[in-house]
Amino acid sequence: MNDATLLEVNDLHAHIGSPRGVVKAVDGVSFDLRHGAALGIVGESGSGKSVMARAVMGLMPPRSDCTGEVLFHGRNLLTLTKKELRAIWGKQIAMVFQDPGRSLNPVVRVDRQLTEGMRQHLGISKSEALTRALGLLTEVGVPDPERRLRAYPHELSGGMRQRVMIAVALACEPELLIADEPTTALDVTIQRQVLDLLRRIQAERSMSLMLISHDLHVVAGRTDRVAVMYAGRLAETGASRTVFDDPRHRYTSALLAATPTIEHERHARLRVIPGSLPSPTDPPAGCRFAPRCTATSDSCLTSQPAMVTIDEDHRVACAHPVMTKQKEGELVGR
């Protein structure tokens, strides 16, 4: 880890026990995040993105096992006790969860949920915490913040609850903010407002951001780098614009092709990715995308592909990466 790197994840495995066997939700993931940078983690539902985020935070459920390294300022978070992690949560690393309706305490007013962390981690008085809370609600765009401070979560709209959740996460000025599908269940207009808000705050505070989404278009213009995740592994990593404009893994291209755009022909059928994710309790021995890929060879069925460098920091885990730009129809099956 160099001085510019805030978070370094090395060969992370996060396995969860279940009645059907061990769920290999994250199975050998490595990446890093620099100070003040924004990293997007994308992939289909069930690809392991949220479990990976919870493993980084140390919020894994019972009957789970995490191995590898999650280095934050050089300390391996996987080896810390819950007491040591609680000193980091909120103050150094914070998380915005998918559903603020379940993340916020429904029987506690907004002011208390905003000020508790500040009073514990920053050691400030109740009046100082309330003043900071009012400023935070203003910063995240909550109208009439004085009245919203006295409200219960159920009295707020979905968009307002998500803004409050972001304010709670920012309360102690963390160095790293993890946003796990922060626009779930929000309408398109509110989604864009929330995403633009996260990007603006990240830039203004020089804070590192990990933005998790199933939509590659969501992270393309709001992150510096992107990591595409499939079935517990990374398929492709690189600068966001590079991966967006010139995808080299057929799964990345399939995600892009399956996302409707304004140029999509009216009444034309939407493209889909054939097949489905492999079972996380019994993944295939070779490439996990092989059953859905259009360029599979015998080696793909028996050997896990290693990450290969395409250009500078653009890397892809594929035995047969796309080496030149091709038309959309050539990259994925119909």
Image (cartoon, rainbow, N blue to C red):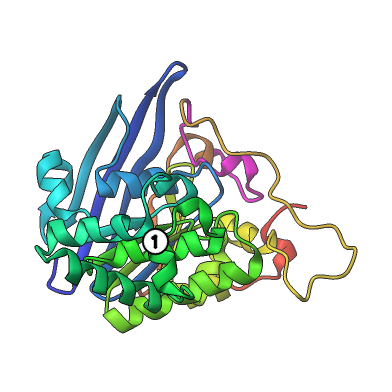
Q: Nearer the viewer, residue 306 or 188?
A: 188
Q: Nearer the viewer, residue 187 or 145?
A: 145
Furthest residue to the bottom?
204
Assess disc 1: are there few (<14), some (14-19) or many (≥20) residues with their C-alpha within 10 Å of its C-alpha. Answer: few
At 32% from the left edge and 73% from the top edge, which residue is drawn?
134
Q: Is residue 68 magenta?
A: no
Q: Is residue 293 magenta?
A: yes
Give the amino acid type for the residue marked by disc 1 in the picture: Arg
Q: Which residues are magenta?
A: 282-298
For the N terminus, give its image quadrant: bottom left
Furthest residue to the right?
267
Residue 318 vertical position relative to residue 149 in the rendered view, above or below: above
Label 1, secondary structure: give it: loop
- Report which residue position mark 1 lands on: 150
At 16% from the left edge and 47% from the top edge, which residue is drawn?
86
Measured as percent of width and height from the top left, residue 156 is found at 52, 59
Residue 189 vertical position relative to residue 296 in the rendered view, above or below: below
Examine the image and state in which quarter residue 38 appears: bottom left
From this viewpoint, is residue 55 visible?
A: yes
